[in-house]
Image (cartoon, rainbow, N blue to C red):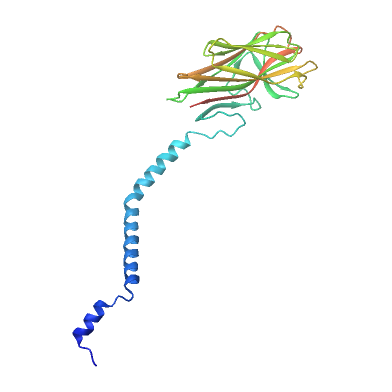
Amino acid sequence: MRMSVAAKLTAFAADETGVVSVDWMVISAACIGLSLATVSVVSGGFDDLSADVASSLAGRPLIDNFHDTGASAWVLADTGFSAGLDGWGGDGTITTVAGFGDILVIDPGGTVETTLSLPEGARTAEIRFDLVGADALSGAASEIWVNGVAIGIARVEAGTAVFEAPPGAPVTAMLAAGGRDLGAGLAPDAVLSVAVAIADPGDTLTLSVRSGSDTAMAQGFFAIDNVVVAAA
């Protein structure tokens, strides 16, 4: 029995074979087209944003030394004095000392200091350095000053060190090594790791370290090393 044209059209319209595949192809094509259209609209904004992020990160160098400066964004100074004074001045001399390498030795009764400009908007500043008390320092003291204010004093004798600070002073010190000759001579040496945290530091930061020793440097001296200053 032959089907009429109308019957064939009706049967074709009612046949669901292959409909899912056709629908999937149409939907997939629509999604791809929508994705391409979206990319063309937002790509310019992504380019601008990525350029802004790159510009911001370029001014915030990574901290890759062994000092932990926490969330600090700017490293303002990082010196072990092997490349020179690096902005330090006053009564001191870079000296190569066995067991320590290049350190900034402070003249008896002298002061060394550095002044750094802080980035605009800096909310905190952090200073870390090693204070060396070498050889025959019989109770001699070294004072630490920040922006003209005394924040701590270290007394060294026979390779031991006692650190004192005014109440509330933003400074801590820990004896990193001591009680034995570290290489500066025959007498015991002491090394204090000093950390200073300053809130609202202002536009500039001046760190000063004074030696209260009255002995000849051949017999004993104060020195500083491994200075890191950072701001956030």
Considering every residue shown, the one lying at the far left of the view is: 6
- Given residues 101 and 199, the one toward you in this image is 199
Left or right: residue 177 compared with residue 229:
right
Left or right: residue 186 compared with residue 131:
right
| Residue drawn where x is 62% and y is 22% of the image | 129
Label tally: 0
Position of the N terminus by quadrant? bottom left
Considering every residue shown, the one lying at the far front of the view is: 1
In x, y percent, where is residue 72? 51, 29
Considering every residue shown, the one lying at the far bottom of the view is: 1
In x, y percent, where is residue 29? 33, 65
| Residue drawn where x is 44% and y is 36% of the image | 56
| Residue drawn where x is 43% and y is 38% of the image | 55
> From what the image shows, is residue 133 above or below residue 30?
above
In x, y percent, where is residue 88? 59, 19
In x, y percent, where is residue 57? 46, 37
Left or right: residue 57 compared with residue 63:
left
Q: Quadrant of residue 17?
A: bottom left
> From what the image shows, is residue 111 above or below residue 18?
above
- Given residues 30 and 225, the one toward you in this image is 30
Considering every residue shown, the one lying at the far right of the view is: 186
- Given residues 104 and 4, the one toward you in this image is 4
